[in-house]
C-alpha cells in the first residue's frame, strides 16, 4: 500500500505541474500533504515533517548552492570560464569536446558531492555552449553522466567510501572495480544519449548566465582560471585522502559516545596508538582537523569564492562594491531553485516519516534472489521512494550486510551493486532532478527523457558490469 500511495503522489505531482501549470515549489508542498494524509498522518505531523524536510535540506545544501552561484558568477564575468573553454577546445578540438567534458567532470566529481561539482561545472557548460554554438544538453549530459558515475561507484566519493566500511570492503578494490563501468556508463549515458538532443534549442535560465564577448587581452590567465575553479576540488580531495588513509571520522554525535571531546582528540588518540609522541600526535591531530574543516563542501566553495574575489576581481582592477553587487545578483537568480529543492526535501521527509522505509525493509526480508541483484533492487526502490541516492545507499547497506556475509559474496561488488541501484529512477523527490531541470531550463517531460533516462542507463550499466565481474570471481 505505501508504494501505491507513492505512485499516487507522483501522478498528482505530474497533474499539478503538467496539467495545471503549477510552480514545482507549490506542487511539491501540496503533494507532500496529500501523500502524508493517504499514509494516515495527521495534518500537524505532516506540517512538522515538511518543516523538518525543508530545514534539513537547506541546512545541508543552501550554502553550497549560494557559494556555487557566486563562484559561477565570478568565473563567468571575469572571463575565466572563457579562458578554460577556449584552451580546452583549442587543445582537444570541438569535435572531441564531449570527451574533454567527460574527463573534466570525472576529475571534478571524484572528490566532491554531486551538487557541489554540478555547480562548479555548470558555468563552464554555459560558456562552452556559447562559444561552440553546440546545444546545452549535448554538452551537459556527458558532464552529468560522469558526475553520476563518481557519485555512485567511486571512492573517495562519500557514499561508496562509507558503504565500503559498512560492507567491510577493500576501498582500493572498490575503486579498481568501479573504474570498469566508468567508460561504458559515460559513453552510453553521456555521449550516445546526448545525440538525441542535438537539435533541442534551450537557453540557460535568465539571470544565471549572460553571453559575454571578451578580447584576448581581457581574459585572465589559464593558471589563475584553473586555480580558482579547482580550489574546491583540491580542498575536498585533501579531505578524501585523509579519509582513505585513516578511515572516515565518526560523526559528531558519535564522538561523545566514544569518549572523545572533539575530532581533534579522536585523531590525537589514534596517532598516539600508532606510536607517535604526545607532542607529535597533538600537532598532527590539529592539522588533520583543519584539513577536514577545509574539505567540507561548504567551506571549500567559500574558500573558492574568496580566491575568486581576490584573483579574478580585486587583482584585475574591479572594486569590492561591484563584486558584491554582482555576487548578490547571482543569489537572486537561484532563489526559486533553492525553494524548489527545499520543497523536494519536504516531500522526501514526508515519505520517510510515513514509514515507507520500514515497509520496504519488510518486503526485502522475504525475497530470496542473488544478493547483488537484491542490493540493486532495494537501493533502486529506496531511490524511487525517498529521492536521495546517498540515503538509498546508506539505507540499503545495513539491510544487505547480513545477507552478504552469509552468502560470502564479494563485499566490493556489493558496494557497486548498491551504488548502481541508488542512481536509478530519479524523479520529483530527488534534488538532482530539480537542479538539472532548472539549470538546463527544461520542461518536466524533457527532464525525464534526458536526466532520468541518463541516470537509469548509468545504473543499469553498473549492475550489468557487476554481474559480469562476479561471473569471473
Image (cartoon, rainbow, N blue to C red):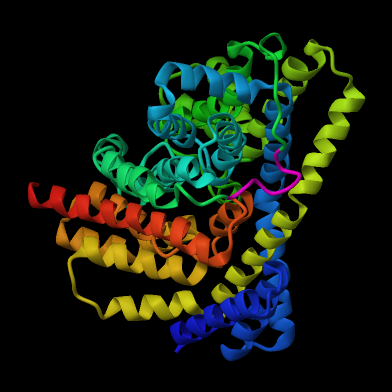
Going by the image, does 108 lie left or right of 418?
right
Q: Main secondary structure of the magenta part?
A: loop
Residue at the far right: name it.
321
Image quarter (top left, top right, bottom left or bottom right) of the N terminus: bottom left
Task: State the residue at coordinates (30%, 62%).
Answer: 376
Q: Residue 358: x, y in percent?
A: 45, 77
Q: Quadrant of residue 284?
A: top right
Residue range (magenta): 202-209
Number of numbered callouts drawn: 0
Q: Quadrant of residue 313?
A: top right
Task: State the residue at coordinates (63%, 31%).
Answer: 300
Query: Residue 76 versus residue 300: which sits nearer the camera?
Result: 76
Q: Residue 205: within the magenta?
A: yes
Query: Residue 432 versus residue 306: which sits nearer the camera?
Result: 432
Going by the image, does 461 lie left or right of 209?
left
Q: Residue 282: x, y in percent?
A: 59, 21
Compared to residue 357, the image places residue 194 above or below, namely above
Compared to residue 222, the image places residue 79 above or below, namely below
Q: Residue 447: within the magenta?
A: no
Please indicate, yes or no, whether residue 262 appears anywhere in the rendered image.
Answer: no
Task: State the residue at coordinates (47%, 37%).
Answer: 109
Residue at the far top: name it.
217
Q: Residue 379: x, y in percent?
A: 37, 64
Amino acid at each position: 500500500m505505501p508504494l501505491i500511495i507513492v505512485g499516487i503522489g507522483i501522478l498528482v505531482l505530474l497533474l499539478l505541474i503538467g496539467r495545471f501549470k503549477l510552480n514545482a515549489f507549490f506542487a511539491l508542498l501540496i503533494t507532500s500533504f496529500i501523500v502524508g494524509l493517504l499514509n494516515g498522518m495527521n495534518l500537524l505531523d505532516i506540517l512538522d515533517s515538511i518543516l523538518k524536510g525543508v530545514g534539513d535540506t537547506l541546512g545541508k545544501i543552501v550554502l553550497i548552492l549560494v557559494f556555487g552561484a557566486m563562484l559561477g558568477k565570478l568565473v563567468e564575468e571575469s572571463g575565466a570560464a572563457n579562458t578554460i573553454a577556449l584552451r580546452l577546445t583549442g587543445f582537444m578540438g570541438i569535435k572531441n569536446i564531449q570527451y574533454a567534458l567527460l574527463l573534466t567532470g570525472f576529475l571534478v566529481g571524484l572528490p566532491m558531492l554531486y551538487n557541489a561539482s554540478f555547480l562548479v561545472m555548470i558555468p563552464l557548460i554555459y560558456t562552452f555552449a556559447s562559444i561552440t554554438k553546440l546545444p546545452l544538453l549535448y554538452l551537459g549530459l556527458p558532464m552529468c553522466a560522469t558526475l553520476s558515475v563518481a557519485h555512485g561507484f567511486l571512492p573517495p566519493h562519500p557514499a561508496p567510501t562509507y558503504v565500503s566500511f559498512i560492507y567491510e570492503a577493500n576501498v582500493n578494490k572498490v575503486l579498481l572495480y568501479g573504474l570498469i563501468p566508468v567508460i561504458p556508463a559515460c559513453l552510453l549515458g553521456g555521449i550516445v544519449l546526448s545525440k538525441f538532443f542535438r537539435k533541442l534549442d534551450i537557453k540557460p535560465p535568465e539571470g544565471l548566465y549572460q553571453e559575454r564577448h571578451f578580447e584576448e587581452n581581457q581574459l585572465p590567465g589559464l593558471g589563475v582560471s584553473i586555480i580558482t575553479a579547482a580550489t574546491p576540488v583540491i580542498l575536498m580531495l585533501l579531505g578524501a585522502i585523509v579519509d582513505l588513509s585513516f578511515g572516515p571520522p565518526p560523526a559528531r554525535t558519535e564522538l561523545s559516545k566514544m569518549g572523545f571531546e572533539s575530532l581533534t582528540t579522536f585523531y590525537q588518540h589514534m596517532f598516539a596508538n600508532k606510536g607517535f609522541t604526545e607532542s607529535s600526535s597533538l600537532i598532527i591531530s590539529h592539522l588533520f582537523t583543519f584539513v577536514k574543516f577545509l574539505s567540507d563542501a561548504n567551506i571549500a566553495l567559500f574558500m573558492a569564492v574568496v580566491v575568486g574575489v581576490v584573483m579574478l576581481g580585486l587583482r584585475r582592477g574591479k572594486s569590492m562594491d561591484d563584486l558584491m553587487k554582482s555576487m548578490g545578483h547571482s543569489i537572486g537568480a537561484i532563489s526559486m531553485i533553492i525553494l524548489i529543492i527545499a520543497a523536494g526535501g519536504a516531500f522526501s521527509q514526508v515519505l520517510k516519516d510515513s514509514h515507507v522505509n520500514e515497509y520496504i525493509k519488510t518486503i526485502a526480508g522475504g525475497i530470496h534472489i542473488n544478493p547483488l541483484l537484491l542490493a540493486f533492487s532495494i537501493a533502486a526502490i529506496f531511490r524511487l521512494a525517498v529521492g536521495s541516492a546517498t540515503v538509498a545507499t546508506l539505507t540499503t547497506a545495513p539491510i544487505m550486510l547480513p545477507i552478504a556475509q552469509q552468502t560470502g559474496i564479494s563485499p566490493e561488488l556489493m558496494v557497486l551493486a548498491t551504488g548502481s541501484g541508488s542512481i536509478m529512477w530519479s524523479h520529483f523527490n530527488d534534488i538532482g532532478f530539480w537542479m538539472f531541470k532548472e539549470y538546463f531550463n527544461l520542461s518536466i517531460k524533457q527532464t525525464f527523457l534526458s536526466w532520468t533516462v541518463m541516470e537509469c542507463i548509468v545504473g543499469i550499466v553498473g549492475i550489468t558490469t557487476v554481474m559480469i565481474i562476479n561471473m569471473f570471481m
